[in-house]
Amino acid sequence: MIDAKRRILLKGSLGAGAIGVALGAGLLTPRAVLADWPEAAFKAEDQATALKELLDSDAVEASDKVMIKAPDIAENGAVVPVTVESDVDGVESISIIASGNNTPLVASFELGEGAVPFVSTRIKMAKTADVVAVVQTADGLLSAAKPVKVTIGGCGG
């Protein structure tokens, strides 16, 4: 039994040593992989400013081709499930806004070419308000909204 533990220790030490040597010699170079973070959009205090910072426009058009699924009543505002999908071709991004939050933009997803326009996530809501889905296409911004009643505050209460 002691020999098995000793072998595991030796294998781990040799593996870590080999990786350390490779890093030191420049054979393995760590790269910074950071997402492009639109900080001003996520810190904006109203929907129009957030959309202008994120998508360069706040001109949204209500559309029945954007479907948003969220509960009518959220028992806990800290965990509100939201699903957004669209029937439109060429969707570039999907953003989710909780209009009652101090900083309403809660999520934004950039979709690759040919991706299915569908996202599902959980968001925080400070109080009862509309959850708005904004879908960006080459033709403009389409949106849909759904009122969600929050019974227990999620963003600080």
Image (cartoon, rainbow, N blue to C red):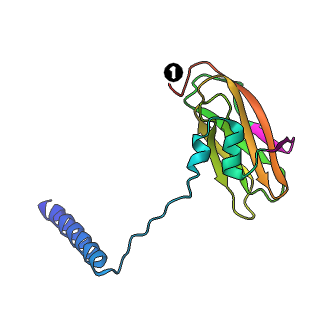
Q: Which residue is mark 1?
A: 157
Query: Which residue appears at 36% of the width and 76% of the height?
Result: 28
Side of 56 relative to 75 (left or right): right
| Image position of 7 with respect to 103: above or below | below
Residues 30 and 86: in front is 30
Main secondary structure found in the magenta portion: strand
Query: Which residue appears at 21% of the width and 65% of the height?
Result: 8
Side of 87 relative to 131 (left or right): right
Query: Which residue appears at 61% of the width and 30% of the height?
Result: 101
Mark 1 packing: few (<14 Cα in 10 Å), some, or many (20+)?
few
| Image coords of residue 85 (percent x, y) | 76, 46
Residues 130 and 81: in front is 130
| Image position of 142 with respect to 27: above or below | above
Side of 94 relative to 144 (left or right): left
Does 67 lie within the magenta span? yes
Classify mark 1: helix, strand or loop. Answer: loop
Q: Which residues are magenta?
A: 59-68
| Image position of 67 with respect to 19: above or below | above
Query: Which residue appears at 72% of the width and 40% of the height?
Result: 48
Q: Quadrant of residue 64?
A: top right
| Viewport quadrant of the N terminus | bottom left
Of all residues, the one furthest to the top in this rendering is 151
| Image coords of residue 148 (percent x, y) | 70, 26
| Image coords of residue 75 (percent x, y) | 60, 22
Residues 47 and 118: in front is 47
| Image position of 85 with respect to 45: above or below | below
Amino acid, disc 1: Gly
| Image coords of residue 34 (percent x, y) | 50, 60
Q: Quadrant of residue 145?
A: top right
Does 4 lie within the magenta span? no
